Amino acid sequence: MNPPRNERALVRPHVVTGGRAHPTRNTFGLITLVSAARDQLTGLSPEKRRLMELCRGGSLSVAEIAGHLQLPVSVTKVLLSDLVDSGHIQTTAPVPTTELPSMKLLQEVLDGLRARL
């Protein structure tokens, strides 16, 4: 008999991370960009293979990866840290910007939106 769905959902993340609750690195924010650095998938778990396949097409944020994998962000960060440690992926911190767009640019966007209506 299979355990109820809620019980399986609680066990799965534990199994996916090998029982670890924390990543080996603490450098992942929700908007950290991740891209594949290697093509080799041999020896990776199914979740890590899927993560690599997602990142082959270009950079994705940690939040997007967690959504595609349907895993909690905390579990995704553990998988990501393993893949950084093994050289399979690379990460890029987003460039913070404090500069607000100009009024001219905002007006052009607004005009463009109105023209489409």
Image (cartoon, helix red, strand yellow):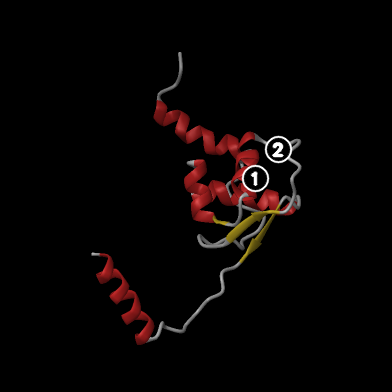
Secondary structure beneath disc 2?
Answer: loop
Give the Cα separation between the discs numbered 2 and 1: 9 Å
Tags 2 and 1 in contact by the CB under 8 Å rule? yes
Q: Position of residue 51 (x, y in %)?
A: 61, 44
Element carrying mark 1: helix
Q: Nearer the viewer, residue 24 or 90?
A: 90
For label 1, the crowd category at 10 Å Cα-Cα, with few meaning under 14, some 14 to 19 and many 20 or more, is many
Q: 90 or 18: which is nearer to us?
A: 90
Identify the residue shown where x is 65% and y is 61%. Answer: 91
Identify which residue, 11 or 68, lies in the foreground.
68
Q: Is residue 22 above or below residue 32?
A: above
Front-most of residues 72 and 43: 43
> Which disc number belongs to residue 44?
2
Packing grade of label 2 (10 A; few <14, some 14-19, many >=20) is few
Q: Position of residue 13 (x, y in %)?
A: 53, 38
The residue most toward the front is 115
Image position of 86 (left or right of 72): right
Query: Which circle's residue, 2 or 1, is located before the other in the chain?
Result: 2
Outermost residue on the bottom side: it is 103
Mark 2 vs mark 1: in front:
1
User: In the visual, does 85 lie left or right of 67?
Assistant: right
Instruction: From the top left corner, tell me how far across and down residue 53 is, in percent.
Output: 63, 43
Q: Residue at x 45, y 13 (%)?
A: 1
For badge 1, the amino acid type reads: Met
Residue 117, x across and y down, in percent = 23, 64
* Picture disc at residue 52: 1
Residue at position x 54%, y 55% in the image? 62
